[in-house]
Amino acid sequence: MTATSQHHWSADPAEVLRVGPGFRLSDVDPDSTPGYEGGKKAGEKDLASGAAQFDELQERLFAQSRLDDGAPSLLLVLQAMDSAGKGGIVRHVIGATDPQGVHLKAFKKPSDEELAHDFLWRIEKEVPKAGYIGVFDRSHYEDVLIGRVRELAAPDEIERRYGAIADFERRLTEGGVHIVKVMLHISHDEQKTRLQERLDRPDKHWKYNPGDVDERQRWPQYMDAYQAVFDRTATEAAPWFVVPANAKWYARLAVQALLLDALERIDPQWPAADFDVEAEKARLAAT
Amino acid sequence: MTATSQHHWSADPAEVLRVGPGFRLSDVDPDSTPGYEGGKKAGEKDLASGAAQFDELQERLFAQSRLDDGAPSLLLVLQAMDSAGKGGIVRHVIGATDPQGVHLKAFKKPSDEELAHDFLWRIEKEVPKAGYIGVFDRSHYEDVLIGRVRELAAPDEIERRYGAIADFERRLTEGGVHIVKVMLHISHDEQKTRLQERLDRPDKHWKYNPGDVDERQRWPQYMDAYQAVFDRTATEAAPWFVVPANAKWYARLAVQALLLDALERIDPQWPAADFDVEAEKARLAAT
């Protein structure tokens, strides 16, 4: 675990946060900071040094793909209840690297055209190409989360989707897309505090949606739907990680560590030149 | 010029860098740092403080658009000879803000499908939506730059395009897209140094393309083609700015200042809530 070896991790976040057999969401304390020995101040410092590492690995990943269409890519799937901090992850973790190598997609309520297709149709189009770091802010998992809680599809269709997702993700990973799935886990109380703040501050009103309270009223059903997601779609190829997110600094640091871990396993290399370097030097010198 | 008032600017970059009547590209010294009194160190410090300002204005721009589909957007068009630093602008200037509010598009050699349409067809699709900061890394101007130098289209078609571009950009600005067009201007010698470095360093080989030297051999024709672009498409609605770019720190600072100037003219405001704030507070409190 070279990514985090000089830091304050006492355990590998890719191990302690991973959804394994027998995982129960209700056992996770949203206030906890699993595997990390430092506090907020140390965490912010570690986030900054991790950012430099993330940036370098991203450049290699991108470079490697320029001469190889079959080179790997990385896909971060972000799911959470409202106000859990998805936006902060994009801004503070993903935002630390070159925007030119990032493909970010926020999935909203499906359009009529999207609804006329299978639920994975709009997802497939946004899978990151070779060399890119893709980020899904919400994803196909909405179709088995709000889809289940709000009964937007029949129960047998919801059942079908779990299997379709597992097949889909296996196909992506076989094609070189490394998938990291993260649920940011805040508590019911913490969400109340955060929504309250959005209502209290006029410069945050634009982030508030009355629908957020509607979904909040179905909190237990959502937790059940997440549990079903973990039971059915946490695979070897595309693991789920549940990140306690009441402490924003911890959530950002942990997601960064998960991405660093994935990038180090990819271990991207600078590509060899596909031209004659000496000949080009001579050609350039003559100009 | 509040954007730069505490900084080391002695003149408004939006004035001194702007292509006005009688502008001659050959009069611009790529080593110069027009309007800026500080050196590299001061410039880097000013870039960092400008980044915070840029980030705040971007958030307001984005927020404003959430409740208003007709809200303004900002489009930065970046043109330059190879190695002039477009990528560095994206990384260090644009990269300072939230990736969620940025729409970045690098235009490569057109595909067969794109060539089967008018040259503006693929451009139109990438115009930033309300609230977004769009960045074109190369653009429709390639169709009158390489298009002219390489004679990829007949002279009368090239002629037609200048007018079509002016009409297109006027339509965009009337629709709320604020356009800032920037040419990063490096010297012939500086390009040689930079390409040489790419050849000398194995970790930079992926950035080198033998075609870069082919285009370099046509340097004077490109300068003429840029001059024609300025003569024909520098309009009140969509001005051109030529930014001396031998000093990377200056180019980044200057482009940031141009964007800050545009954002301040847009003057985005936090939107008023489209819901009953007190009623929502009560609803939330009850959960």
Image: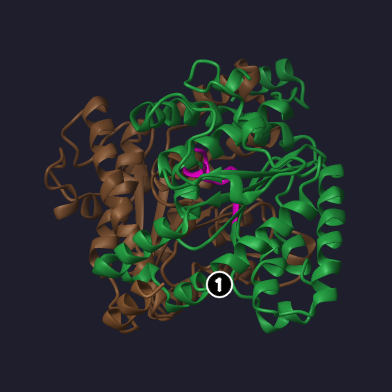
Chain colours: A green, B brown
Three-letter residue code for mark 1: Arg
Q: Quadrant of residue A105?
A: bottom right
Residue B88: x and y in percent read 46, 38
Residue B265: x and y in percent read 24, 66
- The subunit carrying tag 1 is A
Confirm whether the magenta stretch covers residue A103: yes
Residue B18 makes an appearance in the image = no
Above/below status of A72 relative to A157 = above
Q: Quadrant of the N terminus of chain B?
A: bottom left
Residue B77 in the figure: left or right of residue A154 = left
Q: Nearer the viewer, residue A214 or B161?
A: A214
Count of numbered circles on the image:
1
Q: Nearer the viewer, residue B232 or B13?
A: B13
Question: Badge 1 is on which residue?
Answer: A218
Dot 1 surroundings within 10 Å: few (below 14), some, or many (20 or more)?
few
Residue B25 makes an appearance in the image = yes
Q: Quadrant of residue A13?
A: top right
Magenta stretch, residue numbers: A94-104
